[in-house]
Amino acid sequence: MLARVKKLFQATDMTVGAPWKQIVMFTLPMLIGNIAQQLYSTVDSIVVGKYVGDNALSAVGSSAPILNLLLVLFVGISMGAGILVSQYFGAKQREELSYTIGNCITLTAIASVIIMILAVFVTRPMLVMLKTPESILDWCHSYLLILLVGCIGSAYYNILGGILRGLGDAFSSLLYLLVATVINIVLDLLFVAQFGMGVAGVAWATIIAQAVSAMLCYRRLTKMMDLFDMKPQYMKLNKKFSMGVIKLGVPSGLTQAIMSLAMIIVQSLTNSFGEMFIAANVIVMRVDGFAMLPNFSFGTAMTTYAGQNVGAGKYDRVVKGAKQGTLVAVLTSTFMTTMILLFGKQLMGIFTDTAELVELSRNMMGIIAAGYIAMAVTQSLSGVMRGAGDTLTPMWISLFTTVLVRVPIAYTLAHVTKTPEMPNGDQRCVFISLLCSWLLGALLTTFFYIRGKWKKKAFGMADVR
């Protein structure tokens, strides 16, 4: 029994064994971890919705697009780190692995300082630009400012967690995230329900809990010196490795930035429908966060799987794992979608006691439900391409479906459905446009995966290393 527990904390070599089994076993702890991470924002929403009110719920949710936009630097570093770490680990190159990890730690510190400085100057002007209702403007600003100025804990958890996953250790980051989630829930209730700190209270609870998870991840890395070294010389920025992380990570970070900008544009449309629809959108997006978790988890697992096998030169195994992993992801997402459709009303009722808001949220959720199955395909095959070193193709697909498909469809539908009763158009346009972008994204990703240009990137990674 002790040996099994110890094995959970060891790095996983995904270049051997049945592909689907390795992918599933790697995905499970990561999925649980992602669920725990999603609980951060979900518990924030539940606590403020129940103890402060629907307007506070709107404030927490409408801040998300701006928060995501300003944190894309960490998304890029994390993705680049995961890809390079998995490939160097698969290739058993200790020196290169050490430089990659050390440079990631330094790059994260630099990115954190940049975000902290930007946050002070841009958060309120962006909220005003988005026509955030006056009734929630101050709450939105307070929530955002605290999270962004205290972003270093979140930054290091995500980066160090990505490094651990690249090494095949998804269990440790899960365990530490579970600890942090419990801390977050306790502090949410303490700060809001007991101390009456409101929206600011949930923000403080989040950054404290994330700082704890980051410190635990760092401590875990210091105990893995049989795989790499963590000396000052490896922390010093090295052009080859820092640019390697940036080169692989920038497309993912840029994708998130553009998608966040698109969300901000759509958020402006959402705000025009009033506080009730804003609150409904927040609820749907919270449930959406959980519904999408299997897809994101399988996508990350496929990136690590492909990266390690490319590093080991086992290209046929990459293709075999892509087929098996995508099938499992689709089956899992189908089950999740069915549960959401069956228990939608109960899920929405967790966030608010307002019957009208529950019904509106359930109806909007029903529009996008089928899109989750399509996203299972998109995330899995995109993960394979990224792991092989092709981060550009998934980036262009995401940008096209988000910027050139979702935004125009949303605003066009809103315009053509304007009536005296609906002066801003039909509210459903926000979610119909999202469904269209997801479905098209799955088709395009499948096409480019089958086309196979990503394989040339995989074959060329040996030269890069």
Image (cartoon, rainbow, N blue to C red):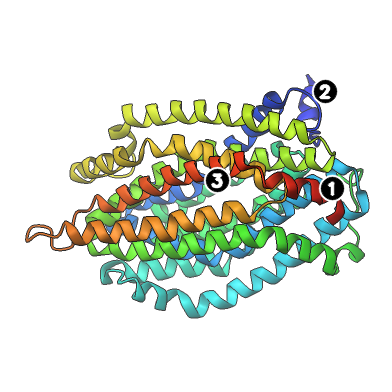
Q: CA distance from mark 2 to mark 3?
A: 28 Å
Q: Is residue 74 left or right of residue 333?
A: right
**Residue at the extreme front of the image, as rendered:** 451
Q: Quadrant of the N terminus?
A: top right
Q: Is label 2 or label 1 in front? A: 1
Please tell me whether residue 120 is drawn above or below residue 159 in the rendered image: below
Q: Residue furthest left?
A: 420
Judged from the image, the secondary structure of the residue bearing numbered disc 3 is helix
**Residue 28, x across and y down, in percent:** 62, 31
Q: Secondary structure at mark 2?
A: helix
Residue depicted at x 45% and y 25%: 335
* Label 3 to label 1: alpha-carbon separation: 28 Å
> Three-letter amino acid code at disc 1?
Tyr
Report x, y in % for residue 82.
72, 50
**Disc 2 marks which residue?**
3
The first of marks 2 and 3 along the sequence is 2
Mark 1 nearby-residue class (10 Å; few <14, some 14–19, many ≥20): many
Quarter assignment of residue 278: bottom left
Q: Give the image location of residue 108, x and y in percent.
A: 70, 64
Q: Can you identify the residue that label 3 sits on?
A: 37
* Quarter of the image where one finds residue 363: top left
Of callouts 2 and 1, the N-terminal one? 2
> Which image quarter holds the C terminus?
bottom right
Q: Nearer the viewer, residue 189 or 3?
A: 3
**Residue holding disc 1:** 88
Foreground pick, 85 / 37: 85
